[in-house]
Image (spheres, helix red, strand yellow):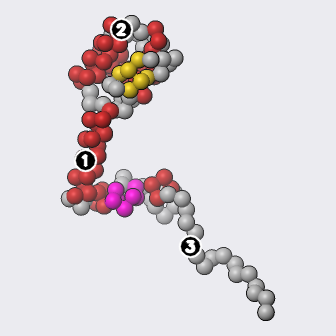
Amino acid sequence: MARIAGVTIPSEKQIGIALTYVYGIGPKTSELVIAKAKVDPTVRVKNLTDDELGRITEVIAADYTVEGELQRIVVANIKRLKDIKSYRGLRHTANLPSRGQRTRTNARTRRGKKITVGGTAKKVAAKT
């Protein structure tokens, strides 16, 4: 099991895919890191040498903000938007989409499970 930036990456996957398990590294960044570290992108993580793992770790540490530090930056940016009461900050506070998506329909990911408004159910006839 290889650890890069504090994350245990899966050993059965190719290094190009396995690097995307690190928060802040996507497919394109993974490609760039592998090219800079001079590692074959199709080699499996379990077949990497310690030297190759070290080079990949050095490249990530030197050039990229990943994992905890990146998450702290993102949270601080959202907090700043909320503190200055910008439109985007208010949308974050209200737990609504902040990038212009419609909310009349859809937006279920942000708004949560649909709640039916009361008074729409048919009333059962009461026995007298």
Within-10-Å neighbours for mark 2: few <14, some 14–19, many 20+: few
**Left or right, residue 30 beside residue 108:** left
Q: CA distance from mark 2 to mark 3?
A: 60 Å
Q: Which numbered marker is on residue 77?
A: 1
Mark whose residue sits in front, 2 or 3: 2
Mark whose residue sits in front, 1 or 2: 2
The vertical placement of 77 against 48, above or below, is below
Residue at the outermost right position: 127
Q: CA distance from mark 1 to mark 2?
A: 37 Å
The vertical placement of 89 against 43, above or below, is below
Q: Quadrant of the N terminus?
A: top left
Q: Which numbered marker is on residue 117?
A: 3
Mark 3 secondary-structure assignment: loop
Mark 1 secondary-structure assignment: helix
Residue where numbered disc 2 is placed: 50
Residue occupying the point 35% across, 21% down? 4
Which contiguous range is marked in magenta? 91-97
User: Is tag 1's residue or tag 2's residue first in the polypeptide sequence?
Assistant: 2
**Left or right, residue 60 beside residue 44:** left
Residue occupying the point 36% across, 52% down? 99
* Three-letter code for the amino acid on which mark 2 is drawn: Asp
* Three-letter code for the amino acid on which mark 1 is drawn: Asn
Q: Residue 85, percent across and down?
A: 24, 61
Q: Is residue 92 magenta?
A: yes
- Give the camera-side residue of 10 and 43: 10
Q: Residue 38, percent across and down?
A: 33, 9
Within-10-Å neighbours for mark 1: few <14, some 14–19, many 20+: few
Mark 2 secondary-structure assignment: helix
